[in-house]
Image (tube, grey):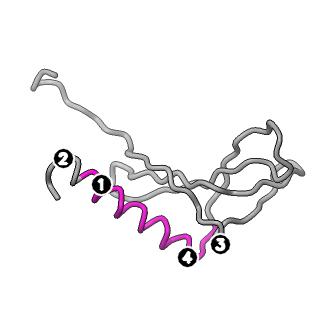
Amino acid sequence: MSSDLEVEVSALAINVTIPQTLRWTDTRRGEAFTLTTLNVRLLPDGHLAAKAYGRPVGGGRGAYVSFPVPDKPELAALVAGAASRAGALWAAHRGLG
C-alpha cells in the first residue's frame, strides 16, 4: 500500500457467543427468536455498538435476525469483556502483548 493513501476504518467488529445462562428470546413479526450471538463494533469515535442475533425458536431455515441488546449489567459486562479480549488477541497477534 502506498504511504500517500489514507486508510479510513469505519468500524472493527467481533462476534461473541452469548453464554447459555444469558440468552433470551425476543419477538419479531409474531415469531419468537432465541438470541445466541452478539456483534460488537468499535466505532471510529471509540464507542462500542452491539446487536444481538438469533434464529427462530422453532428452528428450521428461518433468517438470522438482529435485535437490540437489552440494557442489563451482565450483558454490558459481556460486551466489555469481549472487547477487552479481542484487544488482547489483536495485541498478541501484532507482537504487542
Of tags 3 and 4, the one toward the viewer is: 3
Label 1 CA crowd tier, 10 Å (few <14, some 14–19, many 20+): some
State the CA–CA distance, disc 3 to disc 1.
Answer: 25 Å
The label number, if any, that marks residue 74 in the structure image: 4
* Callout 3 secondary element: helix
Of tags 4 and 1, the one toward the viewer is: 1
Q: Earlier in the sequence, mark 3 or mark 1?
A: 3
Q: Residue at x 16, y 22 (%)?
A: 1
State the CA–CA distance, disc 2 to disc 1.
Answer: 9 Å
**The magenta stretch spans which residues?**
70-90
Residue type, mark 3 in image: Thr
Q: Badge 1 is on which residue? A: 89
Q: Earlier in the sequence, mark 4 or mark 1?
A: 4
In magenta stretch: residue 21: no
Look at the numbered discs 3 and 4 and tell me whether their residues touch, using CB distance below 8 Å: no
Of tags 4 and 2, the one toward the viewer is: 2
* Callout 1 secondary element: helix
State the CA–CA distance, disc 3 to disc 4.
Answer: 10 Å
Residue type, mark 2 in image: Arg
68 vs 45, nearest the viewer: 68
State the CA–CA distance, disc 2 to disc 3.
Answer: 33 Å
Decide if residue 38 is on the left or right side of residue 91.
right
Q: Badge 2 is on which residue? A: 94
Q: Residue at x 86, y 48 (%)?
A: 29
The label number, if any, that marks residue 20 in the structure image: none
Q: Quadrant of the C terminus?
A: bottom left
State the CA–CA distance, disc 4 to disc 2.
Answer: 30 Å
